[in-house]
Image: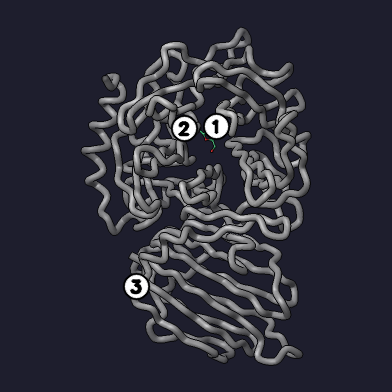
Amino acid sequence: MASPFLQKVRKYEETYEKNIKKEERPDFHLSPRVGWMNDPNGFSFYNGQYHLFYQYYPYDCHWGLMHWGHAVSSDLLHWTYLPAALAPDEAYDKDGCFSGSAITLPDGRHLLMYTGVAKELLADGSIQEVQRQCIATGDGINYEKYAKNPVLTEADLPEGSSRYDFRDPKIWQGKDGTYYAVIGSRPADGSGQTLLFESADGFEWRFHDILCSNRGRYGKMWECPDFFELDGKQLLFVSPQDMLPQGFEYHNGNGTVCIIGSYDEENKRFIEERNQAIDYGIDFYAPQTLLTADGRRIMIGWLQNWDSCLPSTVHAPWFGQMSLPRELSVKDGRLFQKPIRELEALRRNEVRYMDVTFTDVLQLSGISGRKIDMELNIRPVDGNQVYQKFAVRFAQDATHHTAVSFRPHESLLKIDRKFSGSRRAFIHQRRSLVRHRNGRIRLRLILDRFSAELFVNDGEQVLSVSIQTHPDAEGISFFCDGLVNMDIVKYDLG
Ligand code: FRU
């Protein structure tokens, strides 16, 4: 039986989702049923469908008391809302059901592991949020919280770790049947660490070891870890808070880091080899992955960043959306990401221009739209005279546009949403170092009304950004300082 708290939220979302018209949302990116969304949670395949839960505050378009929203899909692109799955209705999670993950139990139940937050008044008069790990099990619609919650508390932490920063369990089952979870934590040095826990049944957990320590290298607290094997390598994803910039790799604020290494299964030791940003754009955070039945590692992230969440930019009563699901691979020691192949089934109305040479400004008939998949193959006309700058503008009308520009002589690619209609002073531009061969570069741009995701060189890098521009601004134009030659293939999506 759903608690009165959960019944209230279920009634609310059913009533107020009607205030959002279909055209006021993204089409194939999941947005909240109503109100606010942050991290993807419980991303899993259960009973023949993909399930995606999310950090959810239905009552307003800003972060608040966290619930878990819920949606299902068969292709990871078309989502159907289900009733909210978790509400903060117990003493141990009264101040929020924070992020977590899901797995299927041998008896067929769906198990959710999440962080329960409960504020405590301390002796010095301050209030702190104590974070503990909790379990709920269910049938894919209704979930019951475990009677013995919380299953991991401050008593399970290694010495010196904070009871106020212990969150975001990502659970999986090892080959030997044992369940494992990586959880974010703050050690005594004030930065971050990823802890490894194990369990024989998914309910009784014990601390195994510190899997990876930040030691102040990438930001402070590490949120939302994920840990998995891919193409013979072991990957650890973390979302650090409070980062300092490092060249063009990492930027200030909340970022995403992929550490590539190897795993000594026997001793459960992670050996780091190299690291990189997961997304080089402005809006991407807290990604979570799943393994599909056909062996693909799919990642989905929150297409926002904490530093640019201002509700005053909202048109309809929702805020926050998920990224496109992306297929991951490791090549030459780097993480590659491609839009999931299911997206190709949404392609309509192909428009193709091959071998187009131009300078200055170019507009092409049939090249426009806000729900598109567009591939650009760009090259200099004369290898001895490489163009200075190439740019593509989109979501364009007389006063608006968002732009991607590339300067081959500096190897810099920039995404710029300064003219996207934002009236706020947060970050609107970001630059990234990219690889190219003497001005030859491949770009694939996916637009879905309120977002742009740019895949560079077949997924070697991705830059994601959310935009608030009115969907009527559908124009696309090209710009070149110098002479460039390009192929364009563009599809409408949906
Ligand atoms: C990351 C995060 C998580 C936490 C959740 C709260 O964006 O801060 O660490 O569980 O959001 O909504």
On the image, numbered disc 3 is attached to which residue? 348
Horizontal side of residue 345 vs 118, given as left or right: left
Q: Secondary structure at mark 3?
A: strand
Residue at screen point 51% across, 74% down: 375
Q: Which label lies toward us, 3 or 2?
A: 2
The disc label shown at residue 103, or none? 2
Mark 3 and mark 2 lie on one chain; the one further toward the N terminus is 2
- In this picture the colour scheme is one colour
Amino acid type, label 2: Ile
Label 1: how many residues lie within 10 Å, few (<14), some (14-19) or many (20+)?
some
Kindly report the distance in space between the C-alpha atoms of the residues bearing marks 3 and 2: 36 Å
Residue 347 in sight from this viewpoint: yes
Whether the residues at callouts 1 and 2 have beta carbons within 8 Å, the answer is yes
> Where does the image place residue 349, in percent across and percent down from the top left?
34, 77
Q: Secondary structure at mark 2?
A: strand
Residue at screen point 26% across, 25% down: 7
Kindly report the distance in space between the C-alpha atoms of the residues bearing marks 1 and 2: 8 Å
On the image, numbered disc 1 is attached to which residue? 173
Amino acid type, label 3: Arg
Nearest the viewer among 123 and 20 is: 20
